Amino acid sequence: MPRHAEAERNDRALLEAAREVLAVDGAHTSVASIAARAGVGIGSLYRRYRSKTELFQHLVDIALDQWTEIAEQGLADNDPWDGLVHYVSSAVGIGSLAPLAGMVTITDEMAEKNARSDKAFAALIAKAHDAGVLRADVTAIDVLLLVEQLGKSPLIEQLQRQGREDLLEAARDARQRVIAIALAGLRPSDHPLPGAPPSMDLFSERWT
């Protein structure tokens, strides 16, 4: 395998592994556990990334590119609802790196990528609101927090720890049903949501 292709494969494996391990271990996640989950040697990992911080910065950088891509794909969909569903479903599949909040120094390049992602996502939410397919009291932050919640599956994580491969397919099917139920809750409703809308500070201040 050419070195560039191998590096890309390792990046994808590391990102997927990091999200899986972060979902369980949170701030206590170790580089060794990520490397083991990804099937990448710890020596190989440290030859490419000088520190845990550098690895985590790279993972956030990749994730920002993915979130921007799915937001722009959603915007390109002629059906505003289908575009929103595409974003939420894809974002849940990508997973959340929220456990890294406060552990990663945000570079100027990452900040620029985040601004582009936020702009595309805001336009996607505005398009859904304008079309009347998204309930009026749902904000962009509501949707982002929903994605963060749906990105974890305690049942699947528990079964994986137990080695219950016989139940994993049914658990994944059940997760898809939960995601569909949550998406249906974004449709317009006569019943207002409780409490005040969450602020951007609530979502983003943990990264500073």
Image (spheres, rainbow, N blue to C red):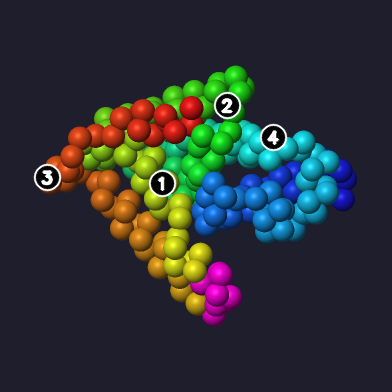
Q: CA distance from mark 2 to mark 4?
A: 11 Å
Residue on which the image places disc 4? 54
Of the two numbered discs 3 and 4 on the same chain, state the one appearing first in sequence. Answer: 4
Residue 131 seen by the camera: no
Q: Any magenta on residue 180?
A: no
Drawn side of residue 170 relative to residue 42, left or right: left
Tag 2: amino acid: Ile
Q: Secondary structure at mark 4?
A: helix
Q: Which mark lies nearer to you, 3 or 2?
A: 2
The residue sitting at 54% across, 40% down in the picture is 100
Residue 160 locus on image (x, y percent): 55, 69
Q: For the point 83% across and 49% down, which residue is it?
A: 43
Q: Which residue is mark 1?
A: 147
In the image, which residues are magenta?
Answer: 159-166
Secondary structure of residue under mark 2: loop
* Picture layout, residue 121 above or below residue 145: above
Residue 190 — which label? 3
Rendered residue at 37%/63% (across/down)? 177
Which residue matches tag 2? 106
Q: Residue at the location (31% across, 30% down)?
A: 199
Q: Mark 2 Cα within 10 Å, few/some/many (few <14, many 20+)?
A: some
Q: Main SS type for the magenta part? A: helix
Q: Quadrant of residue 83?
A: top left
Q: Which comes before the other along the chain, label 3 or label 1?
A: 1
Q: Give me the C-alpha separation between circle 2 and circle 1.
A: 22 Å
Asked if residue 183 lies left or right of residue 31, the reply is: left
Pick whichever, 26 or 44, lies toward us: 26
The residue type indicated by label 3 comes to Asp
Per the model, the C-alpha gap separating discs 3 and 2 is 41 Å
Nearer to the camera, 89 or 35:
35
Q: Earlier in the sequence, mark 1 or mark 4?
A: 4
